[in-house]
Image: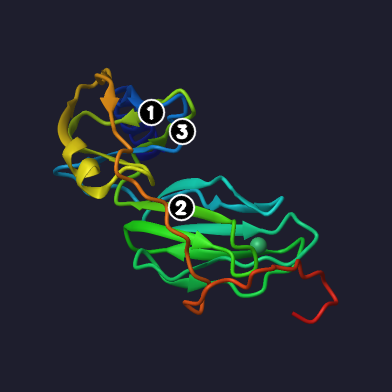
Amino acid sequence: MIWRLVTCFSLAIIAALAGTVSGQVDLGSKDAADVVVSLEPVNATPPAPAKPGSVLHKNKTFVPHVLAIPVGTRVAFPNRDPWFHNAFSNYDGQIFDIGMHPPGTAREVTFRRAGIVRVFCNIHPTMSALIVVLPTPHFAVTKADGVFQIANVPPGDYNLRVFHERVLPEKLQQAERTVTVPADGLQLPKLTLSTAGFIPAPHKNKYGKDYPPVTKDIYPGQVP
Ligand SMILES: [Cu+2]
């Protein structure tokens, strides 16, 4: 009982010593959504992830388009459409393929390596998502106004990193910096990123081939 009280007291102290890190990203346009801002502890091992994540298949769209998770997180792919979907990644963040995925069911994948996982559907070429797997539980994804808040950050030194799919890797690297977070949190100066030089490129299907010119939805009972 005493130990339980001591533990509760210790957790209360840790919570009291954790602050909110907030700021805003400027992408040079009205839409500054889907920028992932993360704080990686310089000298501490981050705790294991707790909550599973999810990426829906809905209206032939992955929702959300950008999901940020700590390493080791399980992500479900529930299919909320009346036709089959698929989710796969052939990129080096983590290679996976959940196969033909019927309506009303969910498949799960655990992401065990930090990196950017580019997710596509092998049936619908317009579908894409990004799963940003981070070596830290301290992160946020911006909304359209670019504002972000990372709550419950313990005081200490952190590497601040950013990711956005239309910002070139060298520019993302230039935006990295070390920040010291005090016990009462930190308001960061505006982070300005540029999408200049980005050229969108069509992706291949899971066999590394171009998608067929006409894609057909596959309903339960149909032979793919
Ligand atoms: Cu699909």
From the image, tell me which residue sits under label 3. 33
- Is label 2 in a helix, a strand or a loop? strand
Q: Is residue 171 visible?
A: yes
Residue drawn 61% across the image and 59% down it: 77
Q: Is residue 2 visible?
A: no
Q: Considering depth in this image, is 58 or 166 the residue closer to the camera?
A: 166
Quadrant of the frame with the C terminus: bottom right
Which numbered tag is attached to residue 151? 1
| Mark before the other along the chain sequence, 1 or 3 | 3
- Is label 3 in a helix, a strand or a loop? loop
From the image, tell me which residue sits under label 2. 130
Of the residues shown, which amino acid type is indicated by label 3?
A: Ala
Q: Residues within 10 Å of mark 1 (few under 14, many from 20)?
A: some
Specify whether 166 is left or right of 207.
Answer: left
Above or below residue 203? Residue 47 is: above
Quadrant of the frame with the N terminus: top left
- Is label 1 in a helix, a strand or a loop? strand
Of the residues shown, which amino acid type is indicated by label 2?
A: Leu
Query: Where is residue 193 shown, x and y percent of the image?
Result: 29, 32
Above or below residue 18? Residue 213 is: below
